[in-house]
Amino acid sequence: MGCCYSTAMGCCYSFCKEDSGPQSGEVSERTHLLVDPVSNTTNILHVHSDDYVNHYASSVPKKTDEQSALNRILHETAANVIDIGALDSHNLEQHEYMDRSKAYSKRIETVGVKVPDISSCLLTDIPAPERILSTEPLPSADRQLIKDMLDKAVSALGDVKVEHKEDLVVPFLS
Amino acid sequence: MERNLEKTMDDVINTEGVIGCILADHQGLCLGAKGKASGDSAGLIAAIADQAAKLEPGSKSPIIYLQNDTRQCLIHRQGPVVAAIYKQVSS
Amino acid sequence: MNHSSHWTRSYIFLNGVYKWKMLLMERIPDQIGYLVLTEDGAVLTSGGELENDERIANLIMGLITLTDNIDSNAFATNEKFDKMSVTYDDHCYIISLSNKKIHVVKKKLTSDGSPPPAAPQPLVDE
């Protein structure tokens, strides 16, 4: 029971690693910093779970199934883990963002697909808006042009009436 | 008679720089269009005039003016009539 | 740790940009109010008669997004404009789009429709 537990723990510990090979000899982040007092003072073999698996996997056949099942769990878990630490490196700097957006739009252009504009707008993006905003709103000649046109149009519209040319009702029999 | 409306538009279209003009009634129905102007735009220019008028409901209708390097567009309402004039920088 | 300092820096940077923008908008000759809006119409900065005026902001958003072509006979399919103005007898609104932000300035005008005679104000210190 104790062994199974420790095996499971080993798998959990090493689930970030692609292959859980033996590492008894090397010093790594998984190496115990403290010497295990139990394994030193008793005859009960209490080895690192990875070692246990590798040492005893072949000699204990019925454990193999358990090991492969645990490996399967390990791989499934690894596949489902979203590594937040790795995501951090994808933070884009402003210029990278611009480069990518340029590259993507160039690619879209070559393919010839037209990406539809979601929202319509009458205005185009311009640099230094303060320059445009400082100009006069409307040339006075244009202001006069449209005012005159409307004055004439309104009075012309008032003149529009039905011209009487012939009777609408004509007697059939007289 | 509508002859006067026609003449009004002819006068405008003969102004230097004007490439098209259009007159619409208060509902956005086209009263007439001359030059590079489509009668289909009558509803749109009336809608633009209406939207701009909402900025200050108490004031007289404003003149809407759009401009880029080569062309300009003027839209204005007076009473029951909305007019639009399209201009091009003559070079 | 790294993130928080990054965000703090961005915030200070953006805050600086907005203050700088406010200054530029305030120095436009004859302005009596201004708005800077995001592309979806949220007010970024505002001042004068247009301070926090979301009603005007929404109406102007409605105006510039009403269509993307007024008349296909007169204008090219993708033709856009640099400037839009809405002119009344004694004041006007001038609207432009820059860096994905909608800039609106309200200005006063003399009765003949021209800007009031005033000493030209330099936009940028030299």
Image: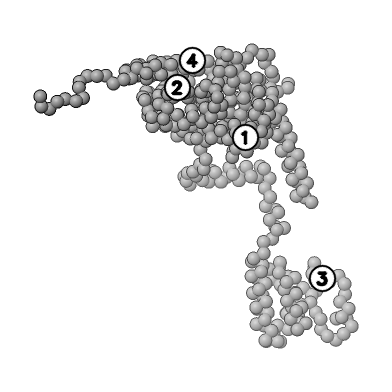
Q: Which residue is mark 2?
A: B79
Asked whether the beta carbons under mark 2 and mark 1 sit within 8 Å of each other, the answer is: no
Task: Give x and y (percent) for residue B89.
Answer: 48, 20
Marks 4, 3 in one chain: yes
Q: Which residue is mark 1?
A: C54
Determine if residue B69 is in view.
no
Q: Which residue is mark 4?
A: A144
| Figure check: A29 above or below B10 | below
Marks 4, 1 in one chain: no
Marks 2, 4 in one chain: no
SS for callout 1: helix
The disc labelled 4 sits on which kind of residue?
Answer: Gln
Question: On what subunit does the disc labeled 1 rest?
Answer: C
Q: Which one is in front in this view, the residue at disc 4 or the one at disc 3? A: 4
Residue B43: name its quadrant: top left
Count every numbered label the image shows and give the total.
4
Asked whether the beta carbons under mark 4 and mark 1 sit within 8 Å of each other, the answer is: no
Q: Disc 3 and disc 1: Cα gap in Å?
A: 63 Å
Q: Disc 4 and disc 3: Cα gap in Å?
A: 88 Å
Question: On what subunit does the disc labeled 2 rest?
Answer: B
The disc labelled 3 sits on which kind of residue?
Answer: Thr
SS for callout 4: helix
Question: On what subunit does the disc labeled 4 rest?
Answer: A
Around disc 2, counting alpha carbons within 10 Å, would you say few (fewer than 14), some (14 to 19), or many (20 or more)? few
SS for callout 2: loop
Asked whether the beta carbons under mark 4 and mark 3 sit within 8 Å of each other, the answer is: no
Q: Which residue is mark 3?
A: A31
Residue B15: name its quadrant: top left
- Residue at position x 80%, y 79% in the image: A47
Q: Which one is in front in this view, the residue at disc 3 or the one at disc 1? A: 1
The disc labelled 1 sits on which kind of residue?
Answer: Glu
